[in-house]
Amino acid sequence: MRNNRTTKGNNRRPNALAILEDAQKLATEGNVNKALSLLRKALSITKKTGDRKAQSLIHSELGLCYQEKGQTNQALKELEKAFQVTPQSSTCLLMLGTVYLERGDLEGAGRYLIRALALAEKEYRKGRFAKDPSNLLNACILLSRASRNLATESLQFGLKKFPNHPLLKQELEALTGT
């Protein structure tokens, strides 16, 4: 594991973002409980430093870990904390929508995914994620699972932006039976 410490002058302090990276690696390897432990440590560091952006990233990762463990209530709490800090993030909205979808709350999922779609489209238009339109595509696909009417509209919207995208075409064909 990498050294999670950074040197600032002679003062050595834990680096919350380095700890976050280690936790993400552990979670990817299936060590979710160890990842949660590191994330809690990183969160306590950011609370002391007041780094709100890092707090949002850590709350998001905590939410993903809890979601992976099937603890959707705890996942929602963490993702909502992340969203409070970064309400203009299509990624936060997508993650919240996904958890609601997993819980079977189609109305809640739709509420967040529609907002994610709108924000992702703005981000894409502004070139923020010009090389990676995945948030826009994911919002279209997830909305297709939340509601039949929303699905048709969102997939058609996605196909206007990406007319030859095979997965969007496949989802729309499966939905409409054509």
Image: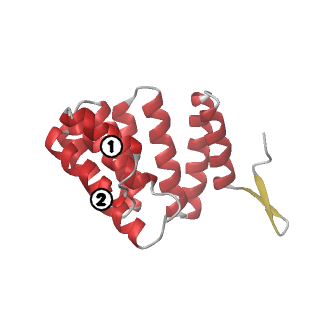
Work out whether residue 7 or residue 98 is closer to the camera in this orientation and state it: 98
What is the x, y in percent for residue 30?
61, 27
Tell which residue pokes out farthest to the bottom in this image: 126
The residue depicted at 14 percent of the width and 43 percent of the height is 149
Mark 1 / mark 2, whichever is N-terminal:
2
Q: Is residue 49 visible?
A: yes
| Label 1 sits on residue | 169
Q: Position of residue 21 (x, y in %)?
A: 65, 47
Q: Residues within 10 Å of mark 1 (few under 14, many from 20)?
A: some
Q: Secondary structure at mark 2?
A: helix
Residue 46 at x, y percent in the picture: 57, 57
Q: Which residue appears at 55% of the width and 50% of the height?
A: 43
Residue 135, above or below 128: above
> Which element type, helix, strand or loop, lies under badge 1?
helix
**Front one among 102 and 159:** 159
What amino acid type is highlighted by mark number 1?
A: Lys
Whole-percent x and y of residue 26? 65, 34
76 left or right, relative to 112: right
Q: Residue furthest right?
A: 10
From the image, which quarter does the N terminus lie in? top right
Q: Which residue is mark 2?
A: 160
For this view, does 141 lie left or right of residue 132? left
Which amino acid, by three-letter code, is at mark 2? Answer: Lys
